[in-house]
Image (cartoon, rainbow, N blue to C red):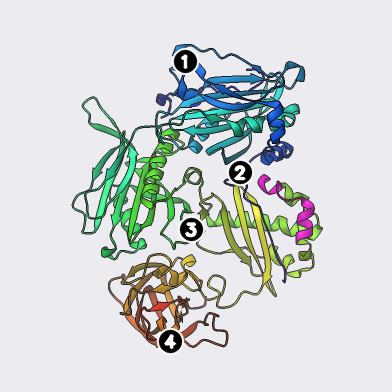
Amino acid sequence: MKGGLAMLYLIKPLLRWHRRFLVEIVVLLVLVMVPDVFAGDSLEFIRTFQKNQMPGNQEIRESYTNFTYKPYEREELSFNILIPNNDWRDIPITIDLKTLQQDTHQLIPLAKQMAPESEKGEAKIEVAYMRLSMELSLYDYVNIFLQNNKDHFDLLMRRKGNYTMRTVEELLLRSEQESKIYMARLTFSRHGDRVFLVSSSALESEFIRYAECFTAAAVSFAAFKNSPASYAEKMTVFTSSGQQELKFNYPESWATEELQGLSGGRTGVDIKLTVRDEKDKPILTYGYVHVSAFSESMAKTPYQIMTRLKKDFEEMPISLDTCILKADIIPKLAAPLGKLERWNAVVKGSLGEVAFLVIPQRDNYIAMGLFSMRPEDNLLTWSHTWRVFEIIAGDLAGKTIDLAKLKTHTLPSENQLKRIAGGTMDDFTKAVRKQNFDDFYDNIANTFKLQVTSDRLIETFKGFAKVKAMEQLGQHTPILEKGLCIDKDSILKFSGHYPTQPEATTFRLTYIREKNDWKLLGIKVAMKKIPKDDNRQSDKSNVLFAENGGQVIFCSSQYNQTSWGAQNLIDGELGNGHGYASKNRNAAEIIFAIPKTETIRELCFNPYTVESPNTWAKHVKVGVSTQSPEKGFVHVGEFTLHNHRGQEKQAPLADQCFDITPTQARYIKLQLLSNHGGSYIEMGEFKAYSAAK
């Protein structure tokens, strides 16, 4: 194809699918999400694409025409689009009826405009569409497009945005055709079961000259008739008959089976996409989603619910292999609440994958599990199953949950993270020593390069050249903080330190995925002493700290599950939204689990919350067990806590710590017996320190 990109056969037929120094630079998020930028030698085009410059209003009035198209006399395909009016040519589109009927298998051209030949840029603006036969996210549709066309172009940048009340996925591409190099901007948007593509292309040497024209076309495109439905296929609403109501949308092509015989307070349903034989007997399950609601009356913690959910899957039987993703999709909730887990799994000798999620729903909890084929085995089915999971999760959570991009990532192992961090910090140290950040700059994310220059990095970090401790980095392996997750925007963030002297070199690094590598998106480096009582970095360890693996597995009374939930006792923070409160002033009992049996030698309590000191815990009792959360508890101490503030009335209290006889523990029971006279029993933090190693 000459002067553009061949984009037929986007989706193949289904049969084919079997001070001191504290310095930080963090890139700004642009458009809706951080864009994916892939080509280091194309920054001029990427910057132009990123700028997204529209023509001015006067120029639009004088030099553009708002074309209205009604392709093939079909109202549902009608649209408006801005086109330059300086002799651009409208090229007629003719296709046969048979091709038009293949709109679920390939892109169908709708319109084509070409710049005057005298301009010699071979610029064109094209519009095409495709109809989805099954529900997919727009992100996944573009993924399949990229997979099917990967041999025809190089992807320079991908981003998500919103134009004229429509969500778009955009690509910047380079393609070589007939010894000529073209640049193209592709803008995808979805309208019910229709996906529209605005494709703008020109010779590479002329692309920037047409950039504003192409932006005007991409931004102004508007489907003339809104889709009557939000989804690509017919949906139905499931409403459970159990005590705990489950209500959500799902595709009519999937079958539901409400679970019977569950314990009181639990409601469950299985949703399956199956292939059936001529006798309507199921022979193969392509996708499976399980949903359960656990009422507050069951007194189950998110940890217990997640454990039960995994056990249910293992009893199917599904063998869990490796956890390849932990993602924080609902921030500010303590793990495992709102944290998505994705696992490699084996089912009857075949490879697949499963996912688990526990989310709050008013005073109850919702547990969700997914089983699917792997994306490398069947990308279409995998994408569809995850989309159904995403729709159900969003309906039950009462908010949009976007897993489209997130699910495509895998979490690096601890050793991989150490190599990533070590490589970045080694490059950083060399750059500081030479006072030349050119090599460091070459290795950062292209998205980062759009925000900073090598000279700015020198200016920002020049003070580190005088820090002697930086010379010691090569003698140490980085020590990472625990509790790593990829966030809802698919950004990897983690912190750690090097035990340099006289001060530790601490870092917080941010990465984004570019093609097959994690590339640096932000860096923060600081020299500071690490307090001995620090939760994460001292020679003694607070084994209850959530980031060290501590979890709440039982709570007899909590005011709510979020801002006053028991998980706040182990989040390492004090203040608003970081305290625990019981439902009333009656005694409360909380049981914690730690990852492995540890020898505990010190307990620390901080009763401080933002409420009245009268509500703060006064008498507490602690027991430990190595056997189970239900039995084997040994009494280790009963303690009286004060609520006396210092002169600074709003300042948090210091921890109140008590040495105990070194005792082995796998489970720790905290009993809050009384307060200082308030209506609730409250506490800010509870810590248990293991013996120094």
Indicate which disc residue 35 carries.
2
Are the residues at dot 4 and dot 3 in contact (C-beta closer than 8 Å)? Answer: no
Query: On the picture, is 522 further left or further right than 618?
Result: right
User: Which residue, given by chain and number where applicable, does mark 3 sit on?
Assistant: 331
User: Which residue, given by chain and number where applicable, does mark 4 sit on?
Assistant: 641
Q: CA distance from mark 2 to mark 4?
A: 51 Å
Span highlighted in magenta in the image: 445-460
Callout 2 environment at 10 Å: few (<14), some (14 to 19), or many (20+)? many
| Mark 4 residue element | loop
Q: Is residue 76 magenta?
A: no
Residue 76 on image: x %, y %: 46, 24
Which amino acid lies under the numbered mark 3 shown in the image of this protein? Pro
User: Which residue, given by chain and number where applicable, does mark 1 sit on?
Assistant: 99
Are the residues at dot 3 and dot 1 in contact (C-beta closer than 8 Å)? Answer: no
- Give the residue drawn at x 49%, y 30%: 195
Which amino acid lies under the numbered mark 4 shown in the image of this protein? Leu
Q: CA distance from mark 1 to mark 2?
A: 35 Å
Relative to 442, residue 133 above or below: above
Q: CA distance from mark 3 to mark 1?
A: 47 Å
